[in-house]
Image: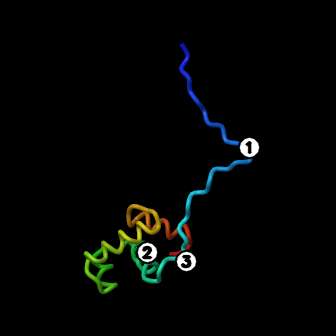
Amino acid sequence: MQSATLHRVPHEGAAAPPAPQPAVGLLAPEEQRLLLLLADGLPLDAIARRLCTSSRTLRRRIRVLCDRIGVRTPLQAAVWAARRGLI
């Protein structure tokens, strides 16, 4: 007995939709600076001191930035910025 499997065949000329890319121009200067500091590999405490903020606030800002650009970790955020020539 043969199992019935359906395979979807794309229409000719139909391309897969491009993955959404966040607009680099939407990053605030503070977010770009944060990306630069993350890429430098500084500990979060040192980054917080440079930005004159608390470690807790810095972690929140990093989380918001990562969500905005579609990554999960600060390292991925730094790689994202490097690939786009921001750092």
Q: In the image, residue 72 lies at what x, y percent?
A: 39, 61
- Foreground mark, 1 or 2, reads 1
Decide: few, some or many residues near mark 2? Use Cα within 10 Å; few <14, some 14-19, many ≥20.
Answer: many
Give the labeled residue for mark 1. 12
- Going by the numbered disc 3, the residue's amino acid type is Gly
At a point 25% along the width and 80% down the height, the residue shown is 54
Residue at the spot of label 3? 25
Q: Residues within 10 Å of mark 1 (few under 14, many from 20)?
A: few
Query: If the image is split into quadrants, where does the N terminus sit?
Result: top right
Q: Secondary structure at mark 3?
A: helix
Disc 2 from disc 3: Cα separation = 14 Å
Residue 63 placement: quadrant: bottom left
What amino acid type should be assigned to the residue bearing mark 1? Answer: Glu
Secondary-structure class at tag 1: loop
**In this picture, residue 30 sits left or right of residue 7:** left
* Label 3 Cα crowd, 10 Å radius (few <14 / some 14-19 / many 20+): few
For the point 29% across and 83% down, the residue is: 53
Which residue was labeled with disc 2? 35
Q: Are marks 1 and 2 in contact (CB under 8 Å)?
A: no
Q: Amino acid at mark 2?
A: Leu
